[in-house]
């Protein structure tokens, strides 16, 4: 079956540009997570949705980062006025429900480079 | 101090070797534990969950020591295809977001 998909796979932005990253979770998955992975590091949590509700955005590094999931399926992570330190791989993951033992399935990521 | 700390690596081992990775976590309220595998320029994929009683999946054995807040992964009879970065992961809250270690790179040589 189809896994988690993300688009675009690669994005090059000039400093100050706004970008939008899309995540299509596995159909029927209630929970959706965004993570940021810098080079040589493990993924770091950004934000979490249960259906359309954003239950935790404690990991968003600044108010330039905004995420939404208006209909409880597709999610968009938006970064305004991009900075060089935003360069990273942005990973989306989904899970069937919000139980702590539930497996999270990751998408291939969007590799963002800010020049 | 990071919430999840792993051996720095890299581990360079010959085929057939046994290799062990260790990990410690700082939050005693952590509820679930995993090892994920990440190939170069790919997404993380679940390798195995880790249970208090220890668990085994083929050549892979994971152990958890809650008292010491320590997690381990043992790989026996290493294959070339085991070359990857192994991420130690914990979940400290019921809502499910994962906390990753930095990862340990394993390179299995012929």
Image: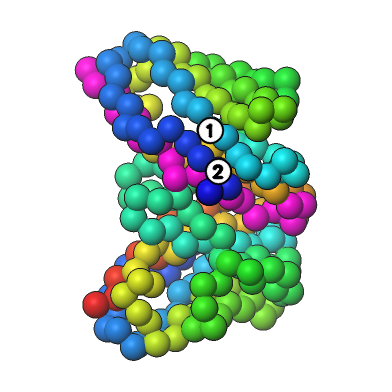
Of label 1 and label 2, which has the lower sequence position? 2
User: For the residue labelled by badge 2, is the local secondary structure a helix, a strand or a loop?
Assistant: strand
Work out which quarter of the rendered image holds the C terminus of chain A and state it. bottom left
Q: Mark 1 and mark 2: span between their CA atoms?
A: 7 Å
Q: Position of residue B55 (x, y in %)?
A: 65, 21
Q: Which residues are magenta?
A: B93-110
Q: Which residue is mark 2?
A: B4
Q: Pick the residue in front: A24 or A13.
A: A13
Q: Chain of mark 2?
A: B
Whether residue B94 is in magenta: the answer is yes
Name the quadrant containing residue A111: bottom left
Q: Is B10 rendered above or below residue B20? A: below
Contact between labelled residues 2 and 1, with CB atoms less than 8 Å apart: yes
Q: Is residue B45 visible?
A: no
Residue lying furthest front: B1
Residue A112: assigned label: none
Q: Pick the residue in front: A57 or A69.
A: A57
Q: Is B89 rendered above or below residue A72? A: above
Residue B23: assigned label: 1
Whether residue A94 is in magenta: the answer is no
Q: Chain of mark 1?
A: B
Q: Position of residue B28 (x, y in %)?
A: 72, 41
Q: Position of residue A48 (x, y in %)?
A: 65, 65
């Amino acid at each position: 079956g189809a896994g988690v998909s993300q688009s675009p796979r690669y994005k090059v932005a000039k400093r100050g540009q706004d970008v939008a990253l899309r995540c299509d979770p596995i159909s029927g998955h209630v929970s959706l997570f965004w993570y940021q992975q810098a080079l040589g590091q493990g993924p770091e949590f950004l934000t979490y949705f249960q259906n359309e509700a954003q239950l935790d955005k404690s990991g968003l590094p600044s108010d330039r980062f905004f995420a939404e999931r208006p209909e409880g399926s597709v999610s968009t992570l938006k970064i305004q006025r991009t900075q060089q330190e935003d360069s990273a791989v942005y990973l989306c993951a989904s899970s069937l429900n919000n139980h702590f033992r539930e497996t999270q399935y990751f998408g291939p990521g969007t590799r963002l480079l800010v020049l | 101090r990071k919430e999840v700390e792993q051996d720095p690596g890299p581990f360079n081992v010959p085929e057939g070797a046994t290799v062990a990775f260790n990990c410690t976590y700082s939050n005693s309220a952590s509820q679930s534990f995993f090892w994920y595998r990440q190939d170069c320029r790919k997404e993380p994929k679940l390798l195995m969950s880790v249970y208090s009683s220890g668990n085994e999946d083929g050549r892979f054995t994971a152990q958890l020591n809650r008292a010491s807040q320590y997690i381990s992964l043992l790989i026996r009879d290493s294959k070339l295809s085991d070359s990857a970065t192994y991420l130690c992961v914990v979940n400290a809250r019921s809502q499910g977001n994962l906390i990753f270690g930095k990862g340990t790179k394993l390179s299995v040589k012929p």
